Amino acid sequence: MKNSRRQCMILSVAGAFTSLLNDKIQAQPMVFEADPQAIKLGYKMDASKIDKLRYGTYVTGQRCNNCSFYQGKPGSGVGGCALFPGRQVAAPGWCLAYAK
Ligand code: SF4
């Protein structure tokens, strides 16, 4: 009984911590196309609007949420990116560093 209560408290604390962490991730600012690093990488928030003449490496269907650098949850509209630490990119976005 005592162990069960302890496990329950641990799970409760872990749940609260996870919730706080999720809130923190949600609160991370977005990467905007005008950000200096975004300009260098040709980041666009909507891959369907990529200028294919300017960005010849872009292939239709490439999006942040199917890039190996993307850290967002499936189904989420935004998520982290390893190349933009502490910020979030748009799931339908794209940049020159895209990696399958
Ligand atoms: Fe999107 Fe991938 Fe570029 Fe990050 S590295 S901005 S996830 S395409």
Image: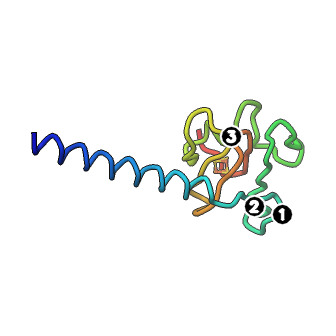
Mark 3 residue crowding within 10 angstroms, few (<14) / some (14–19) / many (20+): some
Mark 3 Cβ and ligand 1 under 8 Å apart = no
What kind of element bears circle 1? loop
Viewer-proximal residue among 71 and 98: 71
Question: Which residue is the site of mark 1?
Answer: 34
Q: Nearer the viewer, mark 3 or mark 1?
A: 3
Rendered location of residue 90, percent (x, y) = 71, 46
Mark on residue 38? 2
Dot 2 or dot 3: first in sequence order is 2
Residue 41 lies in quadrant: bottom right
Dot 3 or dot 1: first in sequence order is 1
Which residue is drawn at the image coordinates 77% and 69% (left, top)?
Answer: 36
What kind of element bears circle 2? helix
Q: Is residue 62 left or right of residue 26?
A: right
Question: Which residue is the site of mark 3?
Answer: 77
The outermost residue toward the bottom is: 36
Q: Is residue 38 left or right of residue 13?
A: right
Residue 52 lies in quadrant: top right
Viewer-proximal residue among 87 and 22: 22
